[in-house]
Image (cartoon, helix red, strand yellow):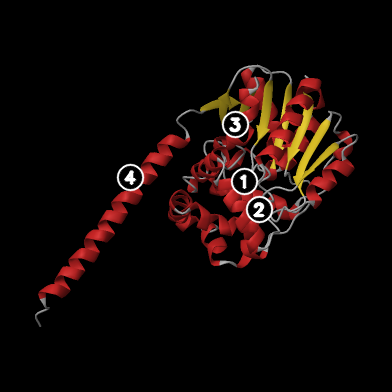
Amino acid sequence: MTWPWWVLGIVVGIALVALGCCWWYRAWLKQVTRKASADSRVAQTALGPVEYGDRGAGPVVLHFHGGNVGHNGWFFLGHLVRAGWRMLTPDRPGYLGTPIENGGSPEQQADLAAALLDALGIDRVATVGISAGGPGAIQFAARHPHRVSALVLLSAISQRTGLSDDQRNSALGRLVMTPRYQDVAYFLINRAMHVLPALSMRDFVRTETTYDAATGKQYIERVLGDPEQKRQVLAMADAMVPALPRFDGVMNDLQVQQTLGELPFDRVTAPTLVVGSRHDGDIGYANSVNSHERIPGAELITVDQFGHLIWWGDAAVTKEFEGRIEKFLRANP
């Protein structure tokens, strides 16, 4: 049988498009893999190797990063670097160059961070825990109180928290929890956030906030209309790729989140500041309330921002609570 010329043309065209997409994806993966660790270092500690980011100069802030990002997520605390602090962000176990074999429990994360400080010759730090980094930060403050001048918890997990229906049952949720398709899935997510950020952020409204679609749309327009907030949206998209080298850490975070036992709040002696949104649709506002109520003397700042992503929404609100964080750290050097 002889195929018409136009059928052969379509087949050849499809093949060329497929090859082009494959080449584009491979080139992109190579680029983001190289970029992910371009400005980091690896320290050999008494408890194993730790990859870490180190930015700025001044008093040291030890940053327990949130889920999916790693040391690349430092930009959420960029205001501290600009205000004169040195930001030290170790990759928690399972992220990039820090093996999960180092130990993924909050206690092990805390002790590994202390071992990194030993290796770098750093004695005392302010400590910040964001989201899934919360349990490790709280354990660090409890297990190494002499090393902690102040503790800041931002949208931080502090109690056992189940996964949302979207995380458990959605097609996207199942896709990003499958190792085989990690890099491909996040390639699509990354490109969508760069090319169609407003459309991509609709998913964030559903998974990160408690807003309805109409209110979420208003927040999306506000976020993308602010150059600094839009820059953070794209920075977050880039901080999550490549995904596969972060997969063990993400899976460990989800396990910790769902099985977390009682944290040693009563052993936290450092002054503590907690910031959370009452519209947090990811881990819930209850985690921030729990930290505030359980840590002796803790102060709580409640905001109405873009849910779990408290840096987005009203730029004036963000500037105000960031200023309060800086004032709090200066008062507890």
Q: Which of 299 and 36 is in front in this view?
A: 299
Which residue type carries mark 4? Ala
Which residue position is annotated with label 3? 48
Which residue position is annotated with label 4? 27
Which residue type carries mark 2? Leu
**Residue 281 in view:** yes
Q: Position of residue 270 (x, y in %)?
A: 83, 28
Determine the residue positioned at 72% across, 18% down. 123
Q: Where is residue 315 in the image (x, y as percent from the top left)?
A: 65, 39
Which residue position is annotated with label 2? 254
Tag 1 near tag 4, CB within 8 Å: no
Picture quarter with the C terminus: top right
State how far apart marks 1 and 2 are (Cα): 9 Å
Tag 1 near tag 2, CB within 8 Å: yes
State how far apart marks 2 and 4 are (Cα): 30 Å
**Residue 332 in view:** no
Determine the residue positioned at 75% across, 55% down. 161
* Nearer-N-terminus badge (3/1): 3
Which residue position is annotated with label 1? 67
* Nearer-N-terminus badge (1/4): 4
